[in-house]
Image (cartoon, helix red, strand yellow):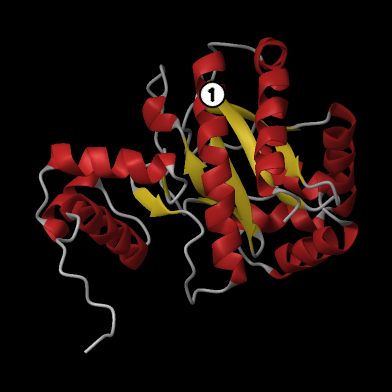
Amino acid sequence: MSRWAPKVKTIDALARGLAVLDEVRATQGASLHELHVSTGFAKATLLRILATLQSRGLIWRRLADDYFCPAGAPDARGRQSQALDRLGQCAAPALDRLQAEVLWPSDLAVRRASAMIVRETNRNQSYFTIRRDNIGFRINMLHSAVGRAYLAFCAEKERESVLAALRRSRREGDALAHDSRAVAAMLERTRRLGYGLRDQRFGGDYDKPRRDQNDRLEALAVPIVAPSGRVYGCVNVVWIQGVRSVDQMVEQCLDPLRCAAQAISAGMGGR
């Protein structure tokens, strides 16, 4: 028996809060309904607990699906997974503010091998109804705004590694990698502009051109750059094709988009 066994009651509210925190950490992300089912707590109670945990920096709410995720909880998934979690955590409030300012939706995309993937998005909060890309959605590197912004501003060694992988690919969507002059010109233009734009032939599908698969969207993207020069990923603004011109969107959205990227980088603290 413990030498210290005080005969006092435990704090039920604290116990409930710790139970919810344990569940969020165990699942690495859960919806309000899932937490209601797993804990048996009323949703009103859960919302108060979750708001308290969030205010203490122990969890964060993902914009893409409203899942409650652990904030920096130790796990065995490795440094890369923890860094991506941290990036999503830093991006969520920045994307929330960005959407409130420009109204059009935005995505956070990171590199995975020779493609970009969606890591966070505010599309379901957007004023405009636009096709929603889920977490993990795979994006073409050479034709998308986020892919072009990433390749243009990442380290040369990393860029050459990605391009070499794309040249080995047999996918139709990666064929541009074999035209080194076109790729070099595209990357130079992106650096000169300071942001990436979609290829006009790209309609959102990884391999099919816009004439065969058209999501009727346009996008511009900027890199999220650490003080060391490392590129964490990219953040974009997406709009409906034909509703606004590129020049109009650049004028309206580029400065807020860059501020969002800078806020995410600052939140990462040079990690």
Q: Is mark 1 on a helix, strand or loop?
A: helix
Q: Is residue 174 above or below residue 197?
A: below
Give the residue at mark 1. 97
Q: Where is residue 141 in the image (x, y as percent from the top left)?
A: 67, 50
Residue in the picture at 89% in, 47% down? 184
The quadrant the N terminus occupies is bottom left
Q: Position of residue 170 (x, y in %)?
A: 63, 67
Classify 10 Å Cα crowding around label 1: few (below 14), some (14-19), many (20 and above): some
Residue 198 appears in the figure: no
Badge 1 amino acid: Arg
17 sits left or right of 37 in the view: right
Residue in the picture at 29% in, 54% down? 30
Depth check: 54 or 206 in front? 54
The quadrant the C terminus occupies is bottom right
Residue 241 appears in the figure: yes
27 sits left or right of 175 in the view: left
Which of the 4 image quadrants contains residue 180?
A: bottom right
Residue in the picture at 83% in, 40% down? 186
112 sits left or right of 149 in the view: left
